[in-house]
């Protein structure tokens, strides 16, 4: 049974009390009259009603009227459906369809037809489907909780801008003052305040008499009304108000709300508005205007270029963190300094860098290593990702972006406690983000192929679809960011949805339409005399890996430019390559002859590389050229290293080998480290990998949407529970003492253990159905309709119509039993 404020709507009347015309008398009765498909549609639209599955229709109706559930349902209404609910909140209860139509479309023949009358049935059907409105067209009722949320009050103005009714505004007013208002309005005196308020209401709702009364108003008084008519309906007054205000107050056109404020009654405002509850009803969703049209191949080509750039950026980002990734803040996330450093390395602004970081994290390519000195680094999944073809690598990123609830756009904002949100830190989840991204792509897909939308028109459409304040503002920010991210990622090209983006939206493999658009990796570069190399496209993996060590990236774009420097060549030599290896590599992969300056650079660095040997003594420097060692000792910059000559070809140092290597390199030398056997150490940097980490799980917005199987099972359970709750039982026979043993109407009679056993045994023998009250091991009481088939050992086994399965019940837990009426069997 219903409880609290929802009792009236959720209570199930006895069958004998049903209205003669068949109209539902409660929300539960209206839901019970729906077919299974309609109930399933309600549970799909409002999945919070399934947690847990209601025991019967009465529980479903009660839960549908709770404040939290109604607020969630109102948040998901479009603008016109919400305007319809707001109009019902200020309409009489119950409200005829004609009155609701006049509130939304206006009264009179000159009322403009803006499509409201044609759109009203759809909006009303939406409210009915979501159990926010019930009743026939002549008795429309808004769920009580929704009326309380949307109806105007002094503390919470109505979105319609209307104020209280005359009856509500005059509550608590002295009878003498009410009679004075009635007399000033030209109405005859009455014998009681109730009839006086009714007479005043009748005057304000009569268009002819109201127009005559307003014709007598001074022009200044009409100006006061014009300022209040569309809301807010409250105005401040002094102890001695101006004559126009006094004229309006004396006739009840303004009524006192407090000692210093007056309010415009709802009936007066509706007359002045021409019967409209809203100044601008919006029955039709705004169109998403096309800003520009492009050829679809051009859109796809642009998107493919963006996809290649996205792959290169993410790979560069993750590789830059594989040797010494940034530390994790104590509160979690990336520091502002590290975000700035990463943005500079990626040649991007900080919001864009935060997007790439969060995207790599969502795809499972980055994670914290979990060590005591915790740092971020690549995961093992990054190595697998790098081996995929480019189109499949992009597919991994795009499929991680679309459902992610973490939003990089929130980086830098303040949380409720005033703390700044950091990239990769907590507090970045926005549950509405996946739905907004998908809706943005759906609106783009509805445009002609190759068309890009007007961004403001797109935001206006989203605002119409979710108009609730707060919800619409968040969705606007998410949509604006989604457009930017889609363009960066290559889901769109020049603002229009690309073929891979359309495949992503339609749950198809986006790699298939993208693969033909991407150029084949090249294994040749153009070496130039200015010590640069131009990569005319994406490089094959082995070439890209070696070139990344041998040269520094100078510029990116359609063609990447690499520059060779002494430091980059030394880096390749430190990695174990020899000068002959580098010459052979460049000759093999150069589309032009190797320039002489580049060959000289490699030979010069290689000739000096390794002439100095650094080892651990604490450390030492060894060189066959004793004059070079003398030069080092004479250099004042070597003083911090603590060098001293041990032999003509050996210097000892106080610094450790790593610091000694860095110090000599800073002085312009090219030393090489050596092992204890005297061999040159290959100083490859060890690429760090975090332990295997799971991808971040999106935070859903409310309960998850149920699938068809769950919906069908829930509807069956509700129907079965409703059968047990509403089944008609036989009246129990009179007791031996003559007193009727009947329980109160609708309640299960209490039966003794012997009576319970005899009844279920008889039902098992005859194959009949009985109604039982049962208390399970957890102490939860329920009512069930069962068909017993076996009674033995203190248990009864039978088919449970409520659960739609065979179950076993302990006899001692059955509180009472009754046979069903003959017409219920």
Image (spheres, rainbow, N blue to C red):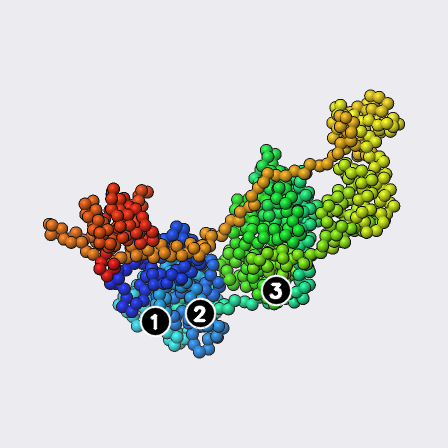
Question: Distance of mark 2 from mark 3, alpha carbons?
Answer: 29 Å
The residue pinned by badge 3 equals 453
Vertical position of residue 414 compared to residue 723: above or below: above
User: Which residue position is annotated with label 2?
Assistant: 120
The residue to which callout 1 is attached is: 202
Seen in the image, is 404 located left or right of residue 24? Answer: right
**In the rendering, at what x and y percent does residue 109 appear?**
44, 78
Q: Given the current orientation, which residue lies at the most extreme left position? A: 737
Q: How crowded is mark 2: few (under 14 residues within 10 Å), some or many (20 or more)?
A: many
Q: Vertically, is 35 above or below 804?
A: below
* Depicted 370 relative to depicted 819: above or below: above
Q: In this view, does 778 lie to the left or right of 321?
A: left
Which one is in front in this view, the residue at disc 3 or the one at disc 1? 3
Say whether residue 468 is visible. yes
The tag earlier along the polypeptide, 3 or 1, is 1
User: Quadrant location of residue 318?
Assistant: top right
Task: Sort mark 3 into few (<14), some (14-19) or many (20+) by Cα contacts within 10 Å.
Answer: many
Residue 745 lies left or right of residue 417; in this view the side is left
Element marked by disc 1: helix
Nearer to the camera, 185 or 722: 722
Residue found at the very far bottom of the displayed protein:
109
Residue 411, visible in the rendered structure: no
Which of disc 2 and disc 1 is earlier in sequence? 2
For the point 73% across and 36% down, the residue is 684
Residue 310, percent across and down?
66, 52
């Amino acid at each position: 049974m219903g409880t609290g404020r929802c009792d009236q709507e959720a209570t199930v009347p006895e069958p004998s009390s049903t209205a003669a015309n068949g109209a539902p008398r409660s929300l539960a009765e209206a839901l019970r009259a729906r077919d299974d498909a309609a109930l399933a549609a309600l549970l799909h639209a409002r999945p919070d009603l399934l947690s847990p599955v209601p025991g019967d229709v009465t529980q479903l109706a009660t839960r549908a009227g709770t404040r939290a559930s109604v607020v969630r349902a109102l948040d998901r209404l479009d603008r016109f459906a919400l305007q319809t609910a707001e109009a019902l909140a200020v309409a009489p209860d119950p409200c005829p369809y004609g009155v609701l139509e006049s509130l939304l479309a206006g009264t009179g023949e000159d009322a403009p037809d803006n499509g409201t009358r044609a759109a009203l049935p759809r909006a009303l059907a939406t409210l009915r489907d979501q159990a926010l409105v019930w009743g026939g067209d002549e008795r429309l009722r808004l769920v009580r909780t929704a009326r309380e949320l949307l109806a105007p009050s002094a503390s919470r103005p109505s979105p319609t801008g209307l104020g209280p009714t005359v009856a509500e505004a005059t509550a608590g007013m002295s009878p003498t003052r009410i009679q004075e208002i009635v007399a000033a309005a030209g109405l005859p005196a009455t014998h009681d305040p109730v009839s006086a308020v009714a007479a005043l209401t009748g005057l304000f709702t009569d268009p002819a008499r109201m127009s005559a009364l307003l014709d007598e108003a001074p022009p200044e008084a009409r100006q006061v009304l014009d300022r209040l008519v569309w809301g807010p309906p409250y105005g401040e007054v002094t102890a001695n108000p101006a004559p126009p205000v006094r004229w309006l107050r004396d006739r009840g056109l303004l009524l006192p709300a407090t000692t210093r404020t007056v309010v415009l009654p709802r009936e007066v405002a509706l007359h002045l508005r021409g019967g409209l509850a809203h100044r601008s009803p919006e029955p039709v969703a705004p169109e998403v205007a096309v800003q520009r049209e492009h050829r679809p191949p051009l859109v796809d080509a642009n998107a493919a270029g963006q996809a290649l750039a996205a792959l290169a950026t993410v790979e560069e980002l993750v590789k830059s963190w594989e040797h010494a990734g940034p530390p994790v803040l104590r509160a979690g996330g990336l520091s502002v300094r590290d975000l700035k450093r990463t943005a500079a390395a990626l040649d991007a602004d900080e919001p864009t860098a935060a997007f790439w970081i969060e995207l790599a994290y969502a795809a499972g390519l980055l994670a914290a290593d979990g060590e005591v000195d915790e740092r971020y680094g690549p995961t093992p999944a990054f190595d697998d990702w790098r081996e995929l073809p480019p189109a499949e690598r992009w597919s991994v990123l795009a499929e991680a972006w679309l459902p992610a609830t973490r939003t990089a756009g929130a980086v830098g904002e303040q949380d409720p406690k005033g703390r700044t949100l950091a990239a990769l830190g907590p507090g970045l989840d926005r549950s509405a983000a996946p739905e907004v991204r998908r809706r943005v792509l759906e609106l783009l897909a509805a445009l002609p192929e190759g068309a890009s939308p007007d961004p403001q028109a797109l935001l206006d459409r989203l605002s119409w679809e979710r108009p609730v304040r707060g919800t619409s503002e968040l969705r606007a920010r998410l949509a604006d960011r989604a457009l930017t991210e889609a363009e960066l990622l290559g889901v769109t090209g020049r603002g229009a949805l690309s073929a891979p983006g359309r495949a992503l939206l339609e749950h198809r493999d986006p790699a298939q339409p993208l693969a033909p658009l991407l150029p084949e990796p090249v294994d040749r570069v153009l070496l130039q005399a200015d010590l640069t190399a131009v990569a005319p496209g994406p490089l094959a993996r082995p070439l890209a890996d070696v070139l990344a060590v041998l040269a520094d990236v100078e510029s990116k774009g359609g063609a990447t430019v690499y520059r060779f420097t002494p430091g980059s060549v030394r880096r390749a030599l430190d990695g174990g390559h020899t000068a002959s290896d580098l010459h052979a590599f460049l000759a093999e992969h150069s589309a032009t002859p190797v320039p002489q300056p580049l060959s000289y650079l490699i030979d010069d660095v290689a000739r000096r590389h390794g002439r100095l040997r650094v080892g651990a003594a604490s450390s030492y420097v060894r060189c066959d050229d004793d004059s070079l060692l003398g030069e080092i000792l004479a250099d004042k910059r070597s003083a911090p290293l603590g060098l001293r000559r041990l032999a003509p070809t050996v210097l000892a140092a106080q610094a450790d080998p790593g610091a000694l290597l860095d110090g000599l390199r800073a002085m312009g030398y090219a030393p090489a480290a050596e092992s204890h056997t005297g061999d040159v150490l290959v100083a490859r940097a060890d690429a760090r990998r975090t332990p295997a980490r799971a991808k971040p799980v999106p935070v859903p917005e409310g309960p998850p949407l149920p699938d068809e199987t769950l919906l069908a099972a829930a509807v069956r359970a509700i129907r079965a529970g409703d059968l047990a709750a509403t089944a008609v039982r036989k009246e129990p026979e009179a007791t031996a003492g003559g007193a009727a043993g009947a329980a109160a109407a609708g309640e299960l009679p209490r039966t003794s253990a012997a009576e319970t056993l005899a009844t279920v045994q008889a039902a098992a023998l005859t194959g009949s159905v009985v109604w039982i009250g049962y208390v399970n091991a957890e102490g939860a009481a329920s009512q069930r309709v069962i068909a017993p088939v076996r009674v033995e050992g203190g248990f009864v086994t039978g088919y449970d119509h409520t659960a739609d399965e065979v179950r076993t019940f302990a006899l001692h837990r059955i509180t009472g039993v009754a046979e069903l009426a003959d017409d219920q069997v």
